[in-house]
Amino acid sequence: MGPQRRYDLVLFGATGFTGALTAGHLARNRPPGCRWALAGRDLGKLEALRARLAEELPDDPDLAKLPLLVADSGDRQALREVAAAARVVVSTVGPFLTHGEPLVAACAEEGTDYLDLTGEPEFVDLMYLRHHQRAVATGARLVHCGGFDSVPHDLGVLFTVGRLPDAADSPVRVEGFLRGSGAPSGGTLASVLAAFARPLGMAQAARRRRAADPAPAGRRIRLGVGLPRWSRTAHAWVLPLPTVDPQVVARSAAALPGYGPDFHYTHHVAVKRLPAAAALVLGTAVLAAAAPVPPLRRVLERLRPAGEGPDAAKRARSWFTVRFVGVSRGHRVVTEVSGGDPGYGETSVMLGESALCLAFDELPRTAGQVTTAAALGPALIDRLTAAGLRFTVLDRPPTAAPGPVGRPAGVTG
């Protein structure tokens, strides 16, 4: 991949809910001279988005001339042309298990870096099995989970391990505790239901992935299942959190030697009140039971149609924190990653900054399917910190959950 590519990056699915937010972030934060384009299946919607960006940023005349590329997620030839024209392609088109593979395949073939925000474990595993080796051969970096799934968790563990001075040579244990407030979009709900609808397929893909992608020889990498309990560290009830994040953390640990010879990670959601914890367990059980039944799944999908999401006022009130406790043989550290609206406001920042990082920063030489920590690592932490997310070392527990602005109490670093 060289300078002959027409675009530094292309945003595919730009007119969707998260895609439009990401387009806005890129419009405001791209570096001078960045050659970028919007892509999607509906030219009218692309033109409307371009006009809106130009109206919101009238001092940027280039936005009115922003190139538009028309391509459907199922049109393999059109996607191949998009991939061939770009150095980096960013996708927000989900559910990815339904719509995502043709673009991944096109990028792997063309040697084009690919980035998405999926949180679907089966999709990530299948893309590794089907396209990792080709991407290694062409030099493409395939980076999944570039939004709230799983950037705060993956980079938060990297940040935490980096503050354990003996981590490279000692057993390392890290626990993560997520707290937050937010509302899902239609696309997120559809992706969650798609994952819950295929428990057998997800398990089979994970088993095949483990066989094809074992842990490095001489190292142990383990994921724990946390038991429900009251945690003094999190100051909350904590429950197991069955998301893609632990798998991503484990793959970063396998790729990066600084995680030590024996690495163990456990992932939790933290809830202040016991009734709320019980309601969360019940709600998850209902989704898991209903998703495999098509009529029930369609009812749930109608609760939040595709393309819809929380309004600006709701996003402004939303927040998240992920606290990490890292322990090695001689040290203990508590860190926290925190920010505003996790699913959309901050996800668009994470995705946009990851794309710019891939396109413009000096990064380790990697290829194939790689995690954000392995491919982007400290460079992305620096970008996200400059964009307003907080990576902090805690000298004492915060007195209250941080909101979208300000710093938590008791922070150093």
Image (cartoon, helix red, strand yellow):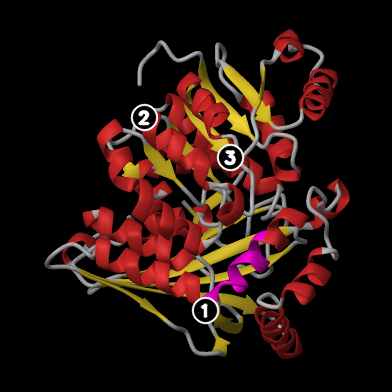
Q: Amino acid at mark 1?
A: Thr
Q: Secondary structure at mark 3?
A: strand
The kind of residue on which mark 2 rests is Gly
Q: Quadrant of residue 211?
A: bottom left
Q: Quadrant of residue 262?
A: bottom left
How crowded is the residue under tag 3: few (<14 C-alpha within 10 Å), some, or many (20+)?
many
**What element does badge 2 sit on?**
loop
**What is the distance, in whole Å, between disc 2 and disc 3 at their CAs?**
16 Å
- 115 vs 266: above or below: above
Q: Which residue type does callout 3 highlight?
A: Ser
Q: Is residue 359 visible?
A: yes
Residue 342 painted magenta: no
**Majority SS type along the magenta span:** helix
Residue 5 appears at what percent x and percent y? Answer: 45, 15
Magenta segment boundaries in residue numbering: 191-199
Q: Which mark is residue 111?
A: 2
Inter-mark Cα distance, 2 to 1: 45 Å
Residue occupied by mark 1 = 233
